[in-house]
Every structure is written in C-alpha cells, then in structure tokens.
Amino acid sequence: MPRIQGVDIPPDKPTHISLRYIRGLGPSTALEVCAKLHIDPQRRAKELSDDEIGRIAALLGGDAYLVEGPLRRQEASNIARLKEIKAYRGERHRKNLPCRGQRTKTNARTRKGPRKTVAGKKGVKDLR
C-alpha cells in the first residue's frame, strides 16, 4: 500500500483516483500531478515504483501544493482568526452551527448533534 504525505492511498484504484485520498488534492489537481511527473493516471497505485512514489511525495512536499498538515493548519488558523475578530462566521463556528446560510429550525443535525428534547407543554388541556 503506497504511503504519500502520511496517507495510505488505496492500491487497487487508478493513480489519479488514489491521489484524491490526500487532503487538498481533487480530481483536476490529481490529474495535473500525474501529467507533471509523466505518470499514467490509469495505472493502478500498486503498480507505481518506489521512484515514482518518491517523485510524487517530493512534488507534494514542496511549495507547489498545499496538502495535508500545512493545509489543515491554514484552515484552523483561518477559523481561529474569524473567531478572534468576532465575525459572524466565527461566532457560528464557536457555537458549532452551520455558517454558510443553511436553515437551522429543521435539519442541521450533522452540525448540531442528536436532538436534545426540552421538557415543556404536554399538549392542549381540556378546559371543561
């Protein structure tokens, strides 16, 4: 199983698909990496030689692409900056609510977590 940037990429998938498992590499960037290094994107990842894996790691480890650790650090610092300046998006991140305009009266369960039932009215009382 090839390991690039600390990520085990799936060996039985084509190289351009396997590279997408690295955070920061999408479809077009994965194909671009294969083209730059003259690697056939349709070859299986397990068929890559150690030299080719090393070249991919060297290219991604340089300053050309922001992937994995540095990307996660940059994202975290961007969110921390929004929280620090008390921006609306930062406040939504702090409260663990959606920050891109989605509704929260219904849905948003992924972000809010399981429902927390609040005790209250049991229904309309009969007034007779």
Image (cartoon, rainbow, N blue to C red):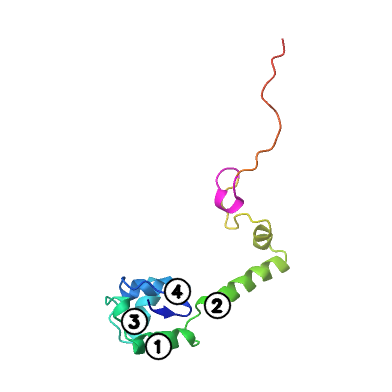
Q: Is residue 45 above or below residue 88?
A: below
Few, some or many residues within 10 Å of mark 4 (<14, 14–19, 20+): some
Which of the labelled discs sits on residue 22, or is there none?
4
Secondary element type, mark 1: helix
- Read off the magenta span: 105-114
Q: Secondary structure at mark 4?
A: loop
Q: Earlier in the sequence, mark 1 or mark 4?
A: 4
- Mark 3: which amino acid? Cys
Image disc number at residue 34: 3
Residue 60 % position (x, y): 45, 83
Dot 3: element: helix
Q: Label 1 sits on what residue type? A: Gly
Judge depth for marks 1 and 2 and give the one in front.
1
Question: In this figure, which residue is indicated by the disc labeled 1?
Answer: 54
Residue 69: assigned label: 2
Of labels 3 and 1, the one closer to you: 1
Q: Residue at x 40, y 85 (%)?
A: 56
